[in-house]
Image (cartoon, coloured by chain):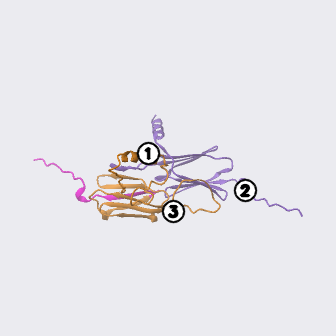
Amino acid sequence: MALIRWRNDLFNPFSDLDRLQDDINQLFNGTRGPAPQQGIFDRTISPAIDMVETKDEFIVMCDLPGVSGDDLDISVTKDVLTIKGEKKGEVKKEESQYYRRESWSGSFQRTIALPTGIDSDKVEAGFHNGVLEVKLPKREEVKPKQISIKAH
Amino acid sequence: MAKDKELAKEQERPRLRGRCDICEEEGKIILRLEMPGVDKGNLDINVNNNQLEIIGHKKDPDIDGNYLVRERTRGDYFHLYTIDETVDRDKIDASLENGILTVTLQLKEAEKPKKIAVKTGK
């Protein structure tokens, strides 16, 4: 849900077709590599996330293999969660000979718009086996309440 | 029967191929495979004859809730490599750190390149 620039050209009747062609081109341009540079605040790479809403909280999960927990910078404001960090590449030795090199290194950022009613003071983050898990508890007033019916 | 069903379920899961680096240095072949979300206990590394099979079972998050965004891949990491006789079968090491599995294959001593000094005839 990072901010992505909306390309809209009122005077070009083929803009939709252009966009479709761009999207299809991107599909074949190697989805394994870094994500296309589209978002204004995206620094080259924005990792894939899952966001789940449960009864009491929102959980954001993010795959970040090869990143150490110290290199992660997670900040939360009232309605935006930002996951920033740097993935350090393997130190390349002189004598090593690569047969295959697919991993990337560098900085990444992902900005996620949050629903209202998150208690930003109680946000917790855990990093385990290359998966970041951020728990964003809901504020008391937004949690669903069970209303019991009193029998007369 | 229950086992068959379990097996069928296992085979239904998509196979992922995470990014990998393969390099050779100092008489070793090092494989670095990205496997986020795989626990040490969920890893299977098998060598049969000349095939090195690496399977990392990625656990699906056990959360009772409603997905608002679902971009992460689901399935099991599966890598299959053919190795030849130069790899020492008894010296295969693996370590898992921060979602990266590092497999080190030691090459046999005799297969390392030897420097041959050229003698000059006097």
Magenta span includes B87? no
Relative image position of residue B48 (x, y in whole percent): 61, 43
Along the viewing direction, whichever of B35 and B96 lies nearer the viewer: B35
Name which residue type carries label 3.
Answer: Lys
Q: Secondary structure at mark 3?
A: loop
Q: Chain of mark 1?
A: A
* Residue at the spot 24% in from the left edge and 56% down from the top edge: A142
Task: Tell which tag, 1 or 2, sits nearer the viewer.
Answer: 1
Indicate the chain coloured orange by its letter: A
Residue type at mark 1? Answer: Ile
Q: Secondary structure at mark 1?
A: helix
Q: Label 3: few (<14), some or many (≥20) within 10 Å?
A: some
Q: Find the residue positioned furthest to the left.
A: A152
Q: Nearer the viewer, mark 3 or mark 1?
A: 1
Report the residue marked by disc 2: B113
Nearer to me, B13 or B47: B13
Where is residue A84? Give x, y as percent. 42, 62
Say which colour chain B has. purple
- Name of the residue lying farthest toward the front: A11
Q: Which mark is residue B96?
A: none
Q: Which residues are magenta?
A: A128-152
Image mark for residue A24: 1
* Residue A135, magenta (yes or no): yes
Query: Which label is found at residue A88?
Result: 3
- Classify mark 2: helix, strand or loop: loop
Residue type indicated by callout 2? Pro
Residue furthest out toward the top: B1
Residue A117, given in percent of the width and then of the height, sits at 26, 58
Q: Report how far apart the C-alphas of labels 1 and 2 lie in the structure.
A: 48 Å
Residue B55 visible: yes
Q: Chain of mark 2?
A: B
| Rendering coords of residue B41 (x, y %) | 50, 51
